[in-house]
Amino acid sequence: MTLANRITLMRMFLSLVIFALIFYRGFWSVLAAFILLTVASISDYVDGVIARRTNTTTHFGAIVDPLADKILILSTFLAFASIRELTIPLWAVFIILLREFTISTLRVLAALHGNVMKAEAAGKLKTTAQLTSSFIIMALLVLKAWLKKHPAHDAAWLTWLVKYSGRIAHDLTVVTALVTLISGFIYLYNHRELIKKSWSEKRAGLGK
């Protein structure tokens, strides 16, 4: 297994750890989750650079790398949704989940036809929106946990952030869900010929 693919698998494992740490909700756990989210996000860039510079791009990496990104984002938002004070709307998380699995299916269809779907501008914008929202919400969680641990250091601006953290997290998630949904429609439109071909194409030996 290539180094780039090992890093990709590590990112998938970190997603599970981040989910558990956020769910636990202690100060040190959410701080660790914030740090690991940073590491996981950077690893997404690192594994791509390594694969290209060492000429070790693989079909496995082309499929699993975007899947690892989706698992990271979904595990993070699902953990956020479990925290009642954040008021994360489940419908928004569902839209994100639905879009990601739909495009993952589209990638599989492309692979079955011998093609590899490359990242598009809409997908990069979606990823930027998701990561930005994740980091901001994670920072709010760290601040809330820190103030709970050190109530004497409640500066006015920190108190304001904590007070409105639920609304901020709610609105960020809604905006992220909308950007994610729109990017999904763009992907489906750009690959409509592949979808039409897959609908009408018969697989050998199945007779359907």
Image (spheres, rainbow, N blue to C red):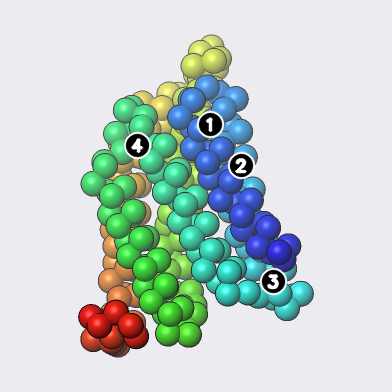
Q: Considering the numbered disc 2 on the image, is that residue within a helix, a strand or a loop? A: helix
Tell me whether the residue at label 1 lies in contact with that at label 2, contact meaning CB atoms closer than 8 angstroms. Answer: yes
- Report how far apart the C-alphas of labels 4 and 2 lie in the structure: 19 Å
- Where is residue 143 shown, x and y percent of the image? 51, 28
The C terminus appears in which quarter of the rendering?
A: bottom left
- Report how far apart the C-alphas of labels 1 and 2 lie in the structure: 10 Å
Observer-nearest of 161 and 109: 109
Disc 3 residue type (three-letter): Ala
Q: Mark 2 = which residue?
A: 36
Taking the image as shown, residue 38 lies to the left or right of residue 172, namely right
Observer-nearest of 134 and 68: 68
- Where is residue 156 shown, x and y percent of the image? 45, 24
Q: Mark 1 = which residue?
A: 21
Q: Considering the numbered disc 1 on the image, is that residue within a helix, a strand or a loop? A: helix
Disc 2 residue type (three-letter): Leu
Mark 2 surroundings within 10 Å by alpha-carbon count, few (fewer than 14), some (14 through 19), many (20 or more): some
**Marker disc for residue 51:** 3
Q: Residue at x 30, y 57 (%)?
A: 98
